Image (spheres, rainbow, N blue to C red):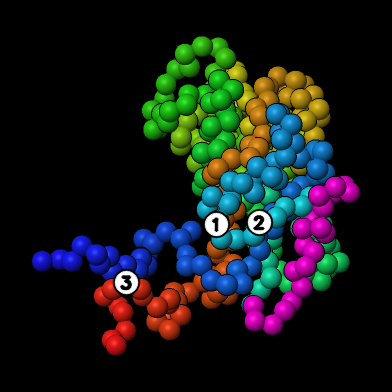
């Protein structure tokens, strides 16, 4: 008969291994590097439609995936909440392999952003690694789909490769995935364009939003294919966009302009994955050894008297 005054022994959680383990699930360890998000533009530019800070909202979203990590954000321009301030105190020290990981909040390669981050890291003498941006990544297509659906330009559910006639004249029959950052960014947007086309069953093409001639050419391709209601979907969080110029560009070529991506939980997950990739490459996040595990407690493990 079991004694009621004794608690059952505590079972330690089992770490799942193999190819199907969650890449965001790791054992906590002391000295975990900080995660610093580099936000394009100034603090004033990096505000969404509700007036909230995109950097702060992204920090909250990433914290849901990495609650044990110190998360900061800083803007590459302006004098408020700067990246220099976010990098303060991250100099090299003994006993830790890395002080921080910088994740640029851009969806494609961006030369100006990369140069600004390198300059800030150099000024702060910070012991950090800089990851790739948030794209290209398959989840970006889902975020683009959500923004288009919220504006009523496409169906909210996936068409699964079935061509369906638009239910009204407000729905798009062609999409331009707009990239910011030059030719390399447009190439990365091509990945999202292919995946978005598979989700919507529509023709989707990438274009460099900073090159009006390229946008005109892509819209011309859509119109030659029979597109009458094109929509430009910016593949960017927002601060790196010149909204007024984009609105003029869309109006000039007879297209509608979708909303930027803004802060989104899927983008937060990508940022957490970028952080994990760096730590895995350094061999930082490894299963603890038997000596590192805490001693078990409970009546079953009481030392013999």
**161 or 283: nearer the viewer:** 283
The verdict on residue 139 being magenta is: no
Q: Identify the residue position indicated by label 3 in the image.
A: 298
Q: Where is residue 162 shown, x and y percent of the image?
A: 38, 28
Instruction: Name the residue furthest right.
Output: 79
Does label 3 or label 1 sit earlier along the sequence? 1
Give coordinates of residue 184: x percent, y percent.
69, 51
Which is more toward the observer, 69 or 105? Answer: 69
Farthest residue to the bottom: give it: 305
Which structural element holds mark 2? Answer: strand
Q: Do the numbered discs 1 and 2 sit on residues whose CB atoms are within 8 Å?
A: yes
Mark number displayed over residue 66: 1
Point out the tag, 1 or 2, that comes first from the N-terminus.
1
Residue at 55% of width from left, 12% of height from top? 169
Labels 3, 2: front one? 3
Residue 118, numbered circle: none
- With 155 as the anchor, is 126 left or right in this view? right
Looking at the image, can residue 186 be seen? Answer: no
Q: Earlier in the sequence, mark 3 or mark 2?
A: 2
Which residue was labeled with disc 2?
A: 71
Relative depth, front residue between 225 and 212: 212
Residue under the point 67% across and 22% down: 256
Q: Using the image, determine if residue 76 lies above or below residue 229.
A: below
Measuring from the top left, give residue 45's x and y in whole percent. Answer: 80, 38
Magenta range: 77-96
């Amino acid at each position: 008969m079991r004694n009621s005054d004794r608690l059952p022994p505590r079972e330690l959680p089992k770490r799942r291994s193999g190819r199907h383990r969650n890449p965001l699930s790791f054992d906590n360890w002391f000295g975990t590097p900080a995660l610093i998000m580099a936000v394009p533009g100034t603090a004033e530019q990096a505000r969404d439609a509700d007036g909230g800070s995109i950097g702060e909202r992204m920090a909250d979203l990433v914290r849901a995936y990495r609650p044990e990590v110190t998360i900061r954000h800083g803007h590459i321009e302006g004098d408020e909440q700067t990246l220099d301030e976010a990098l303060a105190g991250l100099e090299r020290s003994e006993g830790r392999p890395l002080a921080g990981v910088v994740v640029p909040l851009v969806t494609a390669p961006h030369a100006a952003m990369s140069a600004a981050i390198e300059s800030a890291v150099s000024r702060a003498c910070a012991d950090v690694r800089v990851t790739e941006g948030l794209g290209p990544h398959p989840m970006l297509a889902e975020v683009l789909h959500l923004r288009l659906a919220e504006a009523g330009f496409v169906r909210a559910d996936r068409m699964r490769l079935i061509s369906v006639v638009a239910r009204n004249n407000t729905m798009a029959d062609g999409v331009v995935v707009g990239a910011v950052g030059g030719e390399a960014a447009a190439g990365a947007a091509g990945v999202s364009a292919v995946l978005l086309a598979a989700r919507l069953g529509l023709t989707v093409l990438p274009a460099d939003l900073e090159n009006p001639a390229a946008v005109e050419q892509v819209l011309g391709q859509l119109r030659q294919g029979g597109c009458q209601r094109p929509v430009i979907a910016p593949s960017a969080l927002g601060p790196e966009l010149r909204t007024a110029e984009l609105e003029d560009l869309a109006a000039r070529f007879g297209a509608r302009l979708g909303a930027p991506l803004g802060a989104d939980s899927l983008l937060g997950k990508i940022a957490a994955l970028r952080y994990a990739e760096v730590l895995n490459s350094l061999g930082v996040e490894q299963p603890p050894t038997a000596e590192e595990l805490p001693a078990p407690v409970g009546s079953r493990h009481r030392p013999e008297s």
